[in-house]
Image: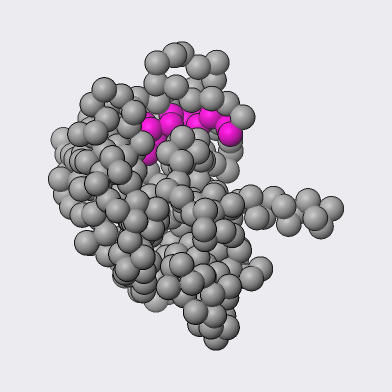
Amino acid sequence: MEAIRESERQKHELEERRVTEQYDAMQRQRTPSSQSDTATATVPSQKKKDRNAGVAVLKTIARQTRQTRGRERRVLASSDPANGSDRDDDDGSSEETSWDERAKMWLEKAAFEYDHPEALIRLGNDAIATAVAGGSSSGGGSRIVVAPSWGDDAIGRFRDEINTLNHPVEKAARLYERAGQKGSAAGWFNYGHLLWTGYPPPSNDETTSDDTTQQHAYLLPPDRDASLAAFQNAIDLNDADASFFVGTHLLSSSDNDGPRQRRRGLDLISAAAAADHGGAQYYLSLLHRNGDAGLSIPASRSAFRTYLDRACANGHAEALFLRGHSFYHGVDEDGFSRDGSAALRDFIGSADAGAADGAVA
């Protein structure tokens, strides 16, 4: 049983690691074989990322939402005008519920009276957390209830629209979209992810295709065109995660317009790397190590080391593991001499950043 639990834990960590590079929030890109073998390191497969991104994004959002709630309760305790000095509540669980309700009330006020993008995103994240906790059969969840004194003119139509949606993920998608329309890159990015694989996303055993109707029961069907449009909106707002995600997708293009698309993909990844996106820097390190004739990129040990070191400086877990592995084995062809101390530092850094392989090493 312990082995089974450990296997499930590692599987969960792998899902979250893959999405780190895409969300933040996202993350994680290379396959296990490339993590353990520097000589065969390759650029990640886009199809594998597509199958894992949806599940990992949802789980990451849910986890982040749970972590944030405790901090919000502490802030509300000092700022809530309803928190009078004569309040007496000896029931800890009741008090926790009260703070949850107050947090929700203020988020709804910010979202539905003032169209505050961050409040819209937080409510969307809460909806995702509800869906993940309840599975794909989750009901619509609680209705948005706003005090009449807040003014129906400002909040009524959008609040009523949200209340007509039957599933938390449908609500999340609409909340993210509205946050994007209000100028939030994160809103567009989250919305794009939901549309990329649909909900619930296919499992690893199911195939994905843009051209055929899948035998997968979607609540929110995937829409790649709308997803890419949402990501482009985030890119226009200088979102490095969106640039990296779309860039890796375009680099995998094999249609008639492939060369031009791949060049644009490289430009997007390079822009993300210039903005200190660790995942983009790590991707470019592998690209320059192996070279790419189609992009006129020669194999370059110096470029590989430069991008790898930058990704490590930004705390990228897989980059740290790869560099530690190279130091440990002394991969001369990549310019690494054996250095046990440097390898240990990178393995520890990789583990601290969330890579299970770093902890094992």
Verify whether residue 200 appears in magenta.
yes
Choose between 235 and 350: the one closer to the eye. 350
Which residue is at 16% across, 35% downward?
Answer: 153
Range of magenta residues = 192-204
Furthest residue in direction bottom, as rendered? 341
Residue 169: name its quadrant.
Answer: top left
Which residue is at 20% across, 34% downward?
Answer: 260
Side of 50 relative to 107 (left or right): right
Rendered position, 313 above or below 239: below
Would you say residue 171 is visible in this rendering?
no
Would you say residue 297 is visible in this rendering?
yes
Colouring rule applied to residues = one colour
Side of 177 relative to 2 (left or right): left
Choose between 130 and 360: the one closer to the eye. 360
Residue 280: name its quadrant.
Answer: bottom left
Counting from the top left corner in percent of width and height, residue 292 is at: 33, 46
Rendered position, 165 above or below 117: above
Residue 25: name its quadrant.
Answer: bottom left
Side of 273 relative to 205 (left or right): left
Which residue is at 46% across, 50% downward?
Answer: 42
Counting from the top left corner in percent of width and height, residue 232 is at: 21, 39
Choose between 210 and 99: the one closer to the eye. 210
Verify whether residue 54 appears in magenta.
no
Counting from the top left corner in percent of width and height, residue 269 is at: 27, 51
Question: Which quadrant, please, contains the C terminus?
Answer: bottom right
Counting from the top left corner in percent of width and height, residue 211 is at: 40, 16
